[in-house]
Image (cartoon, grey):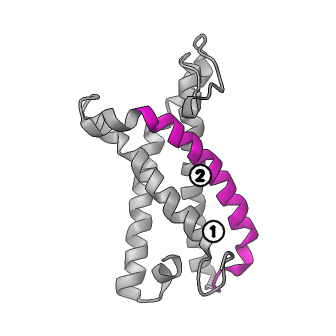
C-alpha cells in the first residue's frame, strides 16, 4: 500500500520517515566533530558527505511535505487538543528539517566556499557575503534544537507504544 490510511502509514510515508531519519542521524553525527574540534574519526569520515547529504535531505523534505499534504485526509481522528499538539510538533520538526540545509547552504556560499553537493558545483567559490554568513550562523543552533525535537519525537513515540499502548508507533513500522 503506497498511500496512508487511518490505520497505517503507507510505504511512501514510511520510506520518507525512516530513510530521512537515518540520514538525519548521519548528519547529527557531525556534532562529534564539532565537540572534538575536528579530531574525532566520525567527523573526519562523515564531513566530506555532510553537504551532499544535507542537500539530498532538502529535496527529500520538500517531497515529503508535498506527500504529507496529499495524505492529510488519511490521518486518524483525534480530539482537538491532541490534533493541535501533533500538528505543532510536526510543524516544528519540518521547520527544522527545512531550515537546516538552507542555513547550511547559506553558510557555505556566504563564506565564499561555494556549494558543491555530490561533486556537482551549484554555486562557485566567491567573495564573502555578510548577510548569508549571518543567516548561515544559525545552522549550529538550529541543529541543537532539531536534536532536542527529535529526542522528544522518539520519546513521545515510545510513550505511546509502551505506556498508552495505542498503536501509534505500529502505524509507522
- Nearest the viewer among 142 and 110 is 110
Q: Where is residue 156 in the image (x, y as percent from the top left)?
A: 42, 73
Callout 2 secondary element: helix
Q: In the rendered structure, which segment of residues is drawn in magenta?
A: 48-77
Which numbered mark, 1 or 2, is in the foreground of this view? 1
Q: Residue furthest top?
A: 127
Q: Where is residue 26 in the image (x, y as percent from the top left)?
A: 40, 48
Above/below status of 134 relative to 78 = above
Residue at x 33% of width, y 36% of height? 45
Residue at x 38% of width, y 78% of height? 159
**Within 10 angstroms of label 1, few (less than 14), some, or many (20 or more) residues?**
some
Instruction: Give the side of residue 16 with respect to residue 145, left or right.
Output: right
Above/below status of 63 relative to 5 = above
Q: In which quarter of the image is the N terminus?
A: bottom right
Q: Which mark is residue 12?
A: 1
Instruction: Give the side of residue 127 with respect to residue 42, left or right.
Output: right
Residue 135: tell me if it is visible. no
Instruction: Locate residue 80: give its quadrant.
Output: bottom right
In magenta segment, residue 74:
yes
Label 2: which residue?
95
Query: CA gap, disc 1 to disc 2?
Result: 20 Å
Q: Where is residue 50 in the image (x, y as percent from the top left)?
A: 46, 37
In magenta segment, residue 113:
no
Callout 1 secondary element: helix
Q: Where is residue 32 in the image (x, y as percent from the top left)?
A: 29, 40
Amino acid at each position: 500500500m503506497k498511500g496512508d490510511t487511518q490505520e497505517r502509514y503507507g510505504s511512501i510515508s514510511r520510506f520518507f520517515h525512516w530513510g530521512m531519519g537515518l540520514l538525519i542521524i548521519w548528519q547529527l553525527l557531525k556534532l562529534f566533530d564539532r565537540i572534538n574540534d575536528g579530531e574525532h574519526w566520525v567527523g573526519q569520515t562523515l564531513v566530506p558527505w555532510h553537504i551532499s547529504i544535507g542537500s539530498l535531505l532538502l529535496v527529500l523534505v520538500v517531497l515529503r511535505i508535498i506527500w504529507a499534504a496529499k495524505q492529510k485526509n488519511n490521518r486518524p481522528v483525534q480530539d482537538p487538543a491532541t490534533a493541535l499538539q501533533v500538528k505543532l510538533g510536526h510543524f516544528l520538526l519540518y521547520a527544522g528539517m527545512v531550515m537546516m540545509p538552507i542555513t547550511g547552504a547559506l553558510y557555505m556560499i556566504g563564506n565564499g566556499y561555494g556549494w558543491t553537493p555530490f561533486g556537482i558545483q551549484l554555486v562557485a567559490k566567491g567573495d564573502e557575503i555578510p548577510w548569508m554568513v549571518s543567516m548561515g550562523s544559525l545552522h549550529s543552533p538550529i541543529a541543537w534544537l532539531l536534536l532536542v525535537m527529535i529526542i522528544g519525537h522518539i520519546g513521545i513515540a515510545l510513550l505511546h507504544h509502551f505506556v498508552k499502548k495505542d498503536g501509534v508507533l505500529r502505524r509507522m513500522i
